[in-house]
Amino acid sequence: MVRIFKFGGASLKNAAAIRNTADIIRQHAAGNQLLIVVSAMGQTTNRLEALYSAYAQPQAGVDHPQEILQEIRQYHEDIARELFGELPETLVALFDNLFGKLETKASSLPHSVPFDEGYDQVLCYGEIISSHLVARYLQHLELPVEWIDSRRYIQTDMTWREARIDWLWTESQVQRQLAPKLKQQIALTQGFIGGTVDGRTTTLGREGSDFTAAIYAHCLRAASVTIWKDVPGILNADPKRIADTYLYPNLSYEEAAEMTYYGATVIHPKTIRPLKSRNIPLYVRSFLNPDAPGTCIGEGQPEGMRPAIIFKRNQRMISFSGRDLTFVSEHNHFVILNACARQNLHINLMQNSAISFLICCDYNPWKVQELVDSLREQFEIKVSDDLELITIKHYDLPTIEKVMKGKKALVEQNTLHTYQAVVPTSAEPLQDSVVPLFEWKPIG
Ligand SMILES: Nc1ncnc2c1ncn2[C@@H]1O[C@H](COP(=O)(O)OP(=O)(O)O)[C@@H](O)[C@H]1O
Ligand SMILES: N[C@@H](CC(=O)OP(=O)(O)O)C(=O)O
């Protein structure tokens, strides 16, 4: 049976991290069929976004595109030099080829195709470059690794930047072409990217490499997926926000899916469904401590869930009220929600009163502006920015009190198991606000 390992940007961010990743792969190579899915190295995808924007809107950017391109190339070359001792001729040729194509596409596409289509053709280079580099390094270590192009296996529609999978085609291609290769050697491929029927590149949404691992697992009916992270597993809060977190040894698919829905960024929200439908366990483990078991996500609900605290930044609240104190009726709800659906705006919380209807959604300036423009004739609209949504699943009162201490809730809601509040975003940077909140005691 196949096992899938996914390594994200943090596990590939420099030469030492890549050596550590190679050690983990080597340890598991014997006796297993392995498919390795890799993301772009470190912050490369963010830098590629900056590169594409700098070419698309030269006047808006502060950095010159050529400088960003050179910085991205230098970063990869420095890592390669450290891994191989010097830059082998074959890698120089590979980099010349890949960075040459990247430059051509980034400079020309913003002016010849729609922005989002060009974005996908450029952003994919983070994963393409990293997968080539890591595969070459593993081959250099004499591991039997074949580089695989995900765009030939994961077929999608043309929803640029958020492509949807053609599951039937993808499964049949993976079964016919990839499954036999895995019996011979380790395959290494890119997360985050797919291809259209006519060979254009698509991306699956930012942070979509976890989803890629789940797609391959589903199609291969894999034994398991392991996502290697810089945290011990799934914790009850982001350790960048709360110091004394608790590790969940086990989580149900439902719990994990809900945590990602509410904003836990440790795994991509789309990852769970393809795994659950084939009952494939998902392990989240630490590449810093690879012998530790981490978290296992699967069937069954563990007893006595401790409160999970999820912070979702970049929220915007929009309130709609009828003009002249008219009631906001079901018909009005329909009009508002319909407009949100048309903008593909993700609503995280809503609340209605007799004269107003309020939503809290992810902050996307263009989408929100279009929504407001399309509804301003019918409603009085008020908008509030710089907000954060706090969700506490399996809450208890002491936890709410501790998390909300010093914060002013603009909206609060609770159901039997879930407490939510919208608060102004705390001014201090994340790292400085890491505070010990709890003294965890054993459940019992
Ligand atoms: N509940 C949580 N448990 C663990 N990590 C979390 C949680 N919520 C947010 N995170 C954050 O997720 C990060 C790991 O995800 P990410 O940076 O996307 O990894 P990668 O890019 O390597 O795939 C952690 O460093 C941590 O700050
Ligand atoms: N490189 C892509 C895809 C991804 O999933 O990356 P990571 O595994 O590092 O979160 C991004 O940054 O969006």
Image (tube, rainbow, N blue to C red):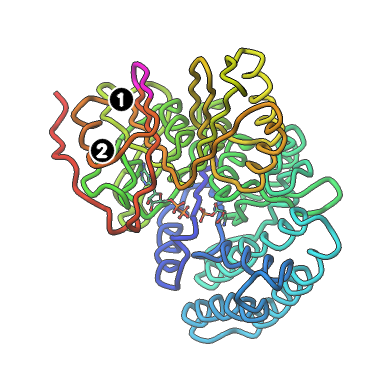
Residue nearest the observer in this picture, 281 or 252: 252
Return the disc, 2 or 1, that comes first in the chain's sequence. Answer: 1
Tell me: 78 left or right of 120: left
Looking at the image, is 316 positioned above or below residue 358?
below
Residue 27 — which label?
Answer: none
The mark tally for this picture is: 2
Mark 1 CB within 8 Å of ligand 1: no
The residue singled out by tag 2 in the image is 403
Quadrant housing the N terminus: top right
Mark toward the viewer: 2 or 1:
2
The residue singled out by tag 1 in the image is 394
Residue nearest the observer in this picture, 57 or 306: 57
Q: Residue 79 location in percent, x, y?
A: 50, 77
Q: Residue 348 location in percent, x, y?
A: 50, 32
Local crowd size for mark 2, using a 10 Å CA cut-off: few (<14), some (14–19), many (≥20): some
Residue 217: in magenta span: no
Tell me the amino acid under the disc marked 1.
His
Looking at the image, is 187 positioned above or below residue 421?
below
Tell me: 224 left or right of 172: left
Secondary structure beneath disc 1? loop
Secondary structure predominantly adopted by residues drawn in magenta: loop
- The residue shown at (37%, 47%) is 285
Tell me the amino acid under the disc marked 2.
Val
Q: Residue 407 location in percent, x, y?
A: 29, 40
- The residue shown at (67%, 52%) is 193
Residue bounds of the magenta highlight? 413-417
Tell me: 276 left or right of 248: right
Local crowd size for mark 1, using a 10 Å CA cut-off: few (<14), some (14–19), many (≥20): some
- The residue shown at (53%, 18%) is 355
Mark 2 CB within 8 Å of ligand 1: no
Quadrant housing the C terminus: top left
